[in-house]
Image (tube, helix red, strand yellow):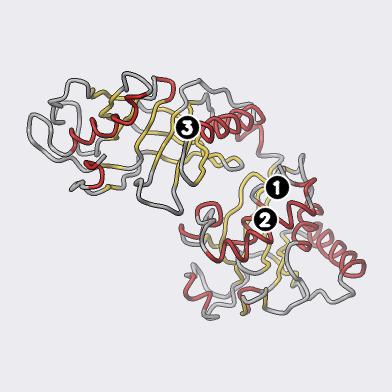
Amino acid sequence: MSLFFTSKSSNETEDHYIIIEKIENIEIRDYQNLIYAAYTPLSEADRNNSFRNIAGYIFGDNNKNEEIAMTSPVVVKIHKKNEMNFIMPKKYNLDNLPIPNNKAVKIYKENSNIKACIRYSGYSNGKIENLKITELKRKLKKHNINHKNDFEVLIYNSPWKIINRRNEISVSVEYNSKKMEKANKNNIEKTYLGGGCFWCIEAVFEDVIGVTNVQSGYSGGKIKNPSYKEVSKGLTNHAEVCEVSFDNQKIKLEDLLNIFFLTHDPTTMNRQGNDIGAHYRSIIFYQSEEEKNIITNFTKKINKELFNNKIVTEIKKFDTFYLAEDYHQNYYKENSSENYCRFVISPKLNKAKNKLNKYYK
């Protein structure tokens, strides 16, 4: 495998798809036309040679002696005898792409397609891949989305990367976004909650039964489109909050409030543990008088029963939610080995899932 480690070609990032919708921890993606350089191993023992064969092609073993930038991810098509594929950069088409000298390397085009993808971290192997395939099948069935059996493994990181590795399982699906949107839109509501770092709030809520999406952002302040730097310096009066989308046929607002109050300390003003500042304040936003009454009554009840009337949570009328920068989204699941995730978020999340297990998948 020395070829892999001495590559002169940089790993090139290109957007090969558009996200249509996020359902729980699944992304529904519209993939554009892709051109693959592929190698199909001759046997189980030959699988380790897959990368070597394709790598030779992109490092110049072709009729033009041309180096081709390696894009991310590497794709392993489980349904095609573990065929390994490199996605060719967008500047190429079937006419201008160099021809492999190695006849075992095949070039072909895959037309645009709708796929469902589920992400996981760490090193990937057959056992883990089968578990993720099973999980993906179960969730697609839950949401009445039909799929083919063309499962693929998407590997984004080089073998030498030890932590925060990104892998995905994808499969083609029958998906009509307008039909599904019409079927679901009447059940979906949103609530906006802040209880310290939004990485924690996101991690707590994204695996809750009935929650369809969680996004991190800012609300409750005085300027438009704030940046994380401005918010964290206390220049905007915004709080770090999460927009929690949920299916009201599967979970009620009162249940979400119960999870919220039991997974952070609502009795400390502008502070959660070592996270100090007004942007870390405990806050709930209401969007109607009916919602205000539900939030106020629930807060009074739990304040009296569990918190000895010490709750300082702010209840405020909702104005605007500003989406946080991309690197804040899905932060815990993509960075679970980072120190903050390991020592702050993981204990909180494990405690929540043990204590409030009826709410979790």
**Is residue 231 positioned above or below 26 on the image?**
below
Is 202 rendered above or below residue 361?
below
Q: Earlier in the sequence, mark 3 or mark 2?
A: 3
Tell me whether circle 1 and circle 3 mark residues in contact (CB < 8 Å). Answer: no
Of residues 55 and 178, the one drawn nearer to the viewer in this rendering: 55
- Whether residues under marks 3 and 2 lie with C-beta atoms below 8 angstroms apart, the answer is no
Secondary structure category for the residue under label 1: loop
- Name the residue beneath numbered marker 1: 208
Residue 323 bears which disc, if any?
Answer: none
Q: Residue at x 54, y 53 (%)?
A: 330
| Residue 347 x, y percent position in the rendering | 67, 61
Kindly give the residue lying farthest to the left in the view shown: 64
Indicate the amino acid at tag 2: Val
Q: Which residue is mark 2?
A: 204
Q: Residue at x 73, y 45 (%)?
A: 360
Residue count near mark 3 (Cα–Cα under 10 Å), binned few <14, some 14–19, many ≥20: many
- Reply above or below: 148 against 167: above
Q: Nearer the viewer, residue 332 or 287?
A: 332
Q: Is residue 323 left or right of residue 244?
A: left
Which badge, 1 or 3, comes first in the chain's sequence?
3
Q: Secondary structure at mark 2?
A: helix
Q: Amino acid at mark 3?
A: Ser
Residue drawn where x is 13% and y is 30% of the image: 98
Give the farthest residue toward the front. 45
Disc 3 from disc 2: Cα separation = 25 Å
Query: Residue at 68% of width from left, 43% of height from top?
Result: 188
Q: Are marks 1 and 2 in contact (CB under 8 Å)?
A: yes
Q: Which type of secondary structure does the marked residue at label 3 adopt?
A: strand
The image's mark for residue 170 is 3
Q: Amino acid at mark 1?
A: Val
